Image (cartoon, rainbow, N blue to C red):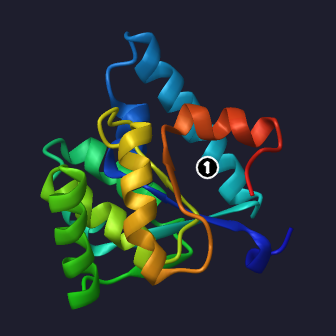
Amino acid sequence: MTDTEARLIYLDTNVYSRPFDDQTPNDIQAEANAFLEIIADVQAKRLALLGSDILDFEVQNILSEEKRAKVKDYLGMRNKHIENSDEVMNLGKGIQNNCHIRARDALHIASAIIGQARYFLSCDKKVTEIKQARCYRRLAKPYRTGYFSAMNPILFVEKMKKGEIE
Protein backbone atom coordinates (compact mmCIF):
# COMPACT_ATOMS: atom_id res chain seq x y z
CA MET A 1 0.00 0.00 0.00
CA THR A 2 1.44 3.41 -0.89
CA ASP A 3 1.16 6.64 1.09
CA THR A 4 -1.77 7.75 -1.02
CA GLU A 5 -3.61 4.49 -0.33
CA ALA A 6 -3.05 4.62 3.43
CA ARG A 7 -6.21 5.19 5.47
CA LEU A 8 -6.10 8.58 7.15
CA ILE A 9 -6.95 8.39 10.86
CA TYR A 10 -7.08 10.90 13.69
CA LEU A 11 -6.00 9.92 17.19
CA ASP A 12 -7.23 11.92 20.18
CA THR A 13 -4.61 13.03 22.73
CA ASN A 14 -5.62 10.26 25.13
CA VAL A 15 -4.73 7.60 22.53
CA TYR A 16 -1.21 9.00 22.06
CA SER A 17 -0.84 9.12 25.86
CA ARG A 18 -1.99 5.56 26.62
CA PRO A 19 1.44 3.86 26.59
CA PHE A 20 2.58 6.31 29.26
CA ASP A 21 -0.44 5.96 31.56
CA ASP A 22 -0.67 3.54 34.52
CA GLN A 23 -0.89 0.13 32.84
CA THR A 24 -2.49 -1.62 35.84
CA PRO A 25 -6.11 -1.44 34.57
CA ASN A 26 -6.63 -4.03 31.83
CA ASP A 27 -8.52 -1.63 29.56
CA ILE A 28 -5.71 0.94 29.63
CA GLN A 29 -3.15 -1.74 28.86
CA ALA A 30 -5.31 -3.02 25.98
CA GLU A 31 -5.70 0.53 24.60
CA ALA A 32 -1.92 1.06 24.86
CA ASN A 33 -1.32 -2.19 22.95
CA ALA A 34 -3.87 -1.17 20.31
CA PHE A 35 -2.08 2.17 19.92
CA LEU A 36 1.26 0.40 19.38
CA GLU A 37 -0.34 -1.83 16.70
CA ILE A 38 -1.72 1.29 15.00
CA ILE A 39 1.73 2.91 15.09
CA ALA A 40 3.22 -0.22 13.49
CA ASP A 41 0.68 0.15 10.66
CA VAL A 42 1.58 3.84 10.32
CA GLN A 43 5.24 2.87 10.02
CA ALA A 44 4.28 0.26 7.40
CA LYS A 45 2.32 2.99 5.56
CA ARG A 46 -0.99 1.14 5.82
CA LEU A 47 -2.33 3.99 7.98
CA ALA A 48 -1.62 7.72 7.92
CA LEU A 49 -1.98 10.10 10.86
CA LEU A 50 -3.79 13.43 10.81
CA GLY A 51 -2.76 16.00 13.40
CA SER A 52 -4.34 19.30 14.42
CA ASP A 53 -3.77 22.51 16.31
CA ILE A 54 -6.02 21.32 19.17
CA LEU A 55 -3.96 18.12 19.43
CA ASP A 56 -0.73 20.16 19.57
CA PHE A 57 -2.27 22.44 22.21
CA GLU A 58 -3.29 19.55 24.46
CA VAL A 59 0.05 17.78 24.09
CA GLN A 60 1.89 21.00 24.91
CA ASN A 61 -0.12 21.11 28.15
CA ILE A 62 0.73 17.59 29.35
CA LEU A 63 2.12 18.22 32.82
CA SER A 64 4.81 15.53 32.84
CA GLU A 65 7.74 16.75 30.76
CA GLU A 66 8.86 13.16 30.08
CA LYS A 67 5.39 12.05 28.94
CA ARG A 68 4.98 15.19 26.81
CA ALA A 69 8.32 14.53 25.06
CA LYS A 70 7.39 10.90 24.33
CA VAL A 71 3.97 11.86 22.95
CA LYS A 72 5.62 14.54 20.78
CA ASP A 73 7.86 11.82 19.29
CA TYR A 74 4.72 10.02 18.09
CA LEU A 75 3.27 13.28 16.79
CA GLY A 76 6.33 13.51 14.57
CA MET A 77 4.89 10.59 12.57
CA ARG A 78 1.91 12.64 11.35
CA ASN A 79 1.36 12.69 7.62
CA LYS A 80 -1.01 15.66 7.52
CA HIS A 81 -1.96 18.56 9.79
CA ILE A 82 -5.19 20.55 9.98
CA GLU A 83 -4.95 24.08 11.34
CA ASN A 84 -7.64 25.79 13.35
CA SER A 85 -9.91 27.75 11.05
CA ASP A 86 -13.35 29.31 11.13
CA GLU A 87 -14.63 26.13 9.50
CA VAL A 88 -13.13 23.91 12.23
CA MET A 89 -14.36 26.25 14.97
CA ASN A 90 -17.91 26.47 13.58
CA LEU A 91 -18.20 22.72 13.06
CA GLY A 92 -16.73 22.19 16.55
CA LYS A 93 -19.40 24.43 18.07
CA GLY A 94 -22.08 22.53 16.15
CA ILE A 95 -20.73 19.20 17.40
CA GLN A 96 -20.47 20.50 20.97
CA ASN A 97 -24.07 21.79 20.96
CA ASN A 98 -25.75 19.00 18.99
CA CYS A 99 -23.80 16.01 20.28
CA HIS A 100 -23.42 17.33 23.84
CA ILE A 101 -19.69 16.83 24.32
CA ARG A 102 -16.92 19.04 25.69
CA ALA A 103 -15.49 21.81 23.52
CA ARG A 104 -12.01 20.28 23.15
CA ASP A 105 -13.43 16.90 22.14
CA ALA A 106 -15.66 18.66 19.62
CA LEU A 107 -12.64 20.46 18.15
CA HIS A 108 -10.76 17.17 17.77
CA ILE A 109 -13.71 15.65 15.94
CA ALA A 110 -14.19 18.75 13.78
CA SER A 111 -10.49 18.67 12.88
CA ALA A 112 -10.78 15.01 11.90
CA ILE A 113 -13.84 15.71 9.75
CA ILE A 114 -12.43 18.80 8.02
CA GLY A 115 -9.06 17.08 7.58
CA GLN A 116 -10.81 14.18 5.82
CA ALA A 117 -9.77 11.47 8.30
CA ARG A 118 -11.74 8.28 7.76
CA TYR A 119 -11.58 7.28 11.44
CA PHE A 120 -11.48 9.22 14.69
CA LEU A 121 -10.09 7.21 17.60
CA SER A 122 -10.46 8.07 21.28
CA CYS A 123 -10.21 6.24 24.60
CA ASP A 124 -13.01 8.43 25.99
CA LYS A 125 -16.06 6.17 26.23
CA LYS A 126 -18.53 9.07 26.07
CA VAL A 127 -16.93 10.39 22.87
CA THR A 128 -17.05 7.00 21.12
CA GLU A 129 -20.58 5.90 22.08
CA ILE A 130 -22.61 4.73 19.07
CA LYS A 131 -25.18 7.48 19.66
CA GLN A 132 -22.39 10.05 19.60
CA ALA A 133 -20.74 8.57 16.51
CA ARG A 134 -24.06 8.83 14.65
CA CYS A 135 -24.33 12.48 15.64
CA TYR A 136 -20.81 13.24 14.32
CA ARG A 137 -21.51 11.35 11.10
CA ARG A 138 -24.69 13.36 10.53
CA LEU A 139 -22.90 16.67 11.09
CA ALA A 140 -19.95 15.57 8.91
CA LYS A 141 -22.05 15.00 5.77
CA PRO A 142 -21.80 18.57 4.36
CA TYR A 143 -18.00 18.49 4.72
CA ARG A 144 -17.10 15.21 3.09
CA THR A 145 -18.01 12.61 0.55
CA GLY A 146 -16.61 9.59 2.39
CA TYR A 147 -17.83 7.75 5.45
CA PHE A 148 -16.66 8.96 8.89
CA SER A 149 -16.49 6.77 11.98
CA ALA A 150 -15.52 7.29 15.64
CA MET A 151 -14.43 4.40 17.84
CA ASN A 152 -12.11 3.13 20.55
CA PRO A 153 -8.62 2.07 19.33
CA ILE A 154 -9.20 -1.50 20.56
CA LEU A 155 -12.28 -1.87 18.35
CA PHE A 156 -10.42 -0.27 15.45
CA VAL A 157 -7.57 -2.80 15.69
CA GLU A 158 -10.05 -5.69 16.00
CA LYS A 159 -11.86 -4.51 12.87
CA MET A 160 -8.55 -4.06 11.03
CA LYS A 161 -7.54 -7.63 11.82
CA LYS A 162 -10.90 -8.86 10.47
CA GLY A 163 -10.51 -6.77 7.31
CA GLU A 164 -13.53 -4.64 8.22
CA ILE A 165 -11.76 -1.29 7.92
CA GLU A 166 -12.35 0.51 4.64
Rendered residue at 40%/44% (across/down): 122
Residue 56: name its quadrant: bottom left
Closer to the camera, 98 or 20? 98
The residue where tag 1 is placed is: 39
Rendered residue at 83%/74% (across/down): 2
Q: Position of residue 78 (x, y in %)?
A: 51, 69
Left or right: 2 with respect to 91? right
Residue type of the residue flagged with mark 1? Ile
Left or right: 31 with respect to 122? right
Rendered residue at 56%/75% (across/down): 79
Residue at the far bottom in the pictured view: 86
Q: Position of residue 65 (x, y in %)?
A: 20, 47
Q: Is residue 14 above or below residue 112?
A: above
Rendered residue at 21%/89% (across/down): 86
Left or right: 45 with respect to 77? right
Residue 105: name its quadrant: bottom left
Q: Quadrant of the C terminus?
A: bottom right
Q: Is residue 31 above or below residue 66?
A: above
Secondary structure of the residue carrying tag 1 is: helix
Closer to the camera, 121 or 75? 121
Residue 26: name its quadrant: top left
Q: Is residue 142 above or below residue 137?
A: below
Q: Is residue 60 above or below residue 131?
A: below
Left or right: 19 with respect to 145? left
Q: Is residue 116 visible?
A: yes
Q: Is residue 128 visible?
A: no
Closer to the camera, 111 or 132? 132
Q: Position of residue 1 (x, y in %)?
A: 86, 67
Q: Position of residue 145 (x, y in %)?
A: 60, 80
